[in-house]
Amino acid sequence: MTEFGFHTTSDEAAAALKDAIAGKTILVTGVSPNSLGSDTARAILAQKPAKLLIASRAADKLQDVIKSLDIPQGSIVQPIVLDLSSLEATRKAAAEVINSVTVLDAMICTAGVMAVPSFEKSKDGIEMQFAVNHLGHFLFINLLMEKLLASELRTVVTYSSEAQSRANLSFLDDLSYNEGKEYEKWTAYSNSKACDVLLSVGLVQHFGQRGLRSFSVDPGVIVTTGLTRSVPMEDFKALGWIDDNGNLNSAIKAKSLAEGSSAGIIAAFDSRLSNEDGYYLADGVLTREALLPGAVDSAEAEKLWRISEALTKQAV
Ligand SMILES: NC(=O)c1ccc[n+]([C@@H]2O[C@H](COP(=O)([O-])OP(=O)(O)OC[C@H]3O[C@@H](n4cnc5c(N)ncnc54)[C@H](OP(=O)(O)O)[C@@H]3O)[C@@H](O)[C@H]2O)c1
């Protein structure tokens, strides 16, 4: 069986795992042109799923992605407009999915925002990075849980980042960062990415006995996606990521789009992976290296779960 690593591409991973993909119903969030989600969708589609649902907030971007896809005979692609910054819109999108599928084998949740420049609230009054990266996905996944549990694969993948290692989980005691006065955009991003790992832990704590598996992935550094759009170049210079000419620091080992998006495909479809061995993958393998210990702590996961239930008024 294939071993996966830093340079494994989405096409290589999907081809190696084709038996798990063919004929399945799969949902990917965060599908816009040039995103990790769109490359994930493209590579999965080549292995003939029965149905691929692609979700993002902009209907026109979803149509652009669909136009770029090579849809095999027998596979159906369905766009789902999903705005994770609104609980109401997330419920609407989940209802659309529920009406469109009998089962849902795997969800690969790549949608996210990074380093929102100043303190911003979602439509529900919740700090934006936590709202989009964690809370919207918490609600969306839980609304689709019965479809997941009725499926063969029963797998959820969340997209984290090595940024989780710099999280400070005390923010769970004040999600508003003292009403924005203590908001620091990179810490808020790190915190939301630790929540991605904690969500995988929480999902297994709540539904593992019913066969649910969940993994969180660090895709690596991919500089060609839309993620950095709200980050001024000066910030990357100050962080030492790029030099004055805009060249990437040679110490940063960047990945291609396809190397980055293999992460979620491996996590979703490699049946050798077990939550008994971990929750977090980097470079295609389960690891605890560079993982904030609190991000896989069962009590922290339960604390986040209870907070998320209260905020979404979704008892699960
Ligand atoms: N690229 C990297 O180096 C890197 C590294 C570590 C982790 N990650 C993680 O990988 C994931 C994918 O990132 P990416 O690099 O592919 O970035 P991207 O190109 O910006 O893709 C993010 C996707 O999320 C969507 N999105 C943003 N806000 C949303 C909302 N309110 N509701 C629904 N969808 C929303 C975006 O839609 P729009 O196009 O409309 O904005 C886009 O489709 C993120 O979770 C990110 O944290 C990326």
Image (cartoon, helix red, strand yellow):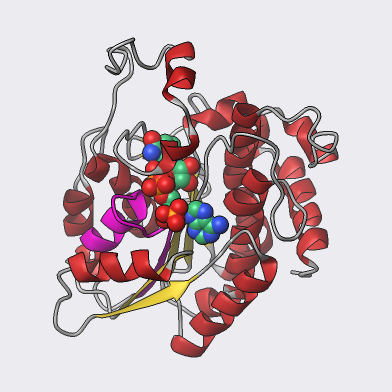
Counting every numbered tag in the picture gives 0
Is residue 268 positioned above or below 22 on the image? above
Reply yes or no: does residue 259 show up in magenta.
no
218 vs 63, nearest the viewer = 63
Q: 135 above or below 115?
A: below
Q: In this view, does 144 lie above or below 262?
A: below
Q: Which residue is drawn at 60% across and 34% down?
A: 117
Please tell me which residue lies in front, 299 or 161: 161
- The image quarter containing residue 25 is bottom left
The stretch drawn in magenta includes residue 30: yes
The magenta segment is 25-43
Which residue is drawn at the image coordinates 48% and 14% (left, top)?
Answer: 239
Residue drawn at (42%, 41%) of the image: 227
Does residue 281 appear in the picture of this structure? Answer: no
Give the answer, above or below, for where 166 lies relative to 62.
above
Say whether residue 243 is left or right of residue 93: left
Lateral position of residue 16 relative to residue 112, left or right? left
Q: From the top left corner, tell me how far across and down residue 188 is, in percent.
A: 65, 34
Image-based side of 222 in relation to 155, left or right: left
Quadrant for the C terminus in the image: bottom right
The one nearer the camera, 197 or 187, is: 187
x and y, in percent, of residue 49 in the image: 26, 74
How far across and how far down the image is residue 39, in percent?
27, 54
Please provide percent x and percent y for residue 232: 46, 27
Q: Can residue 138 be seen in this view?
A: yes
In-image side of 279 versus 127 (left or right): left
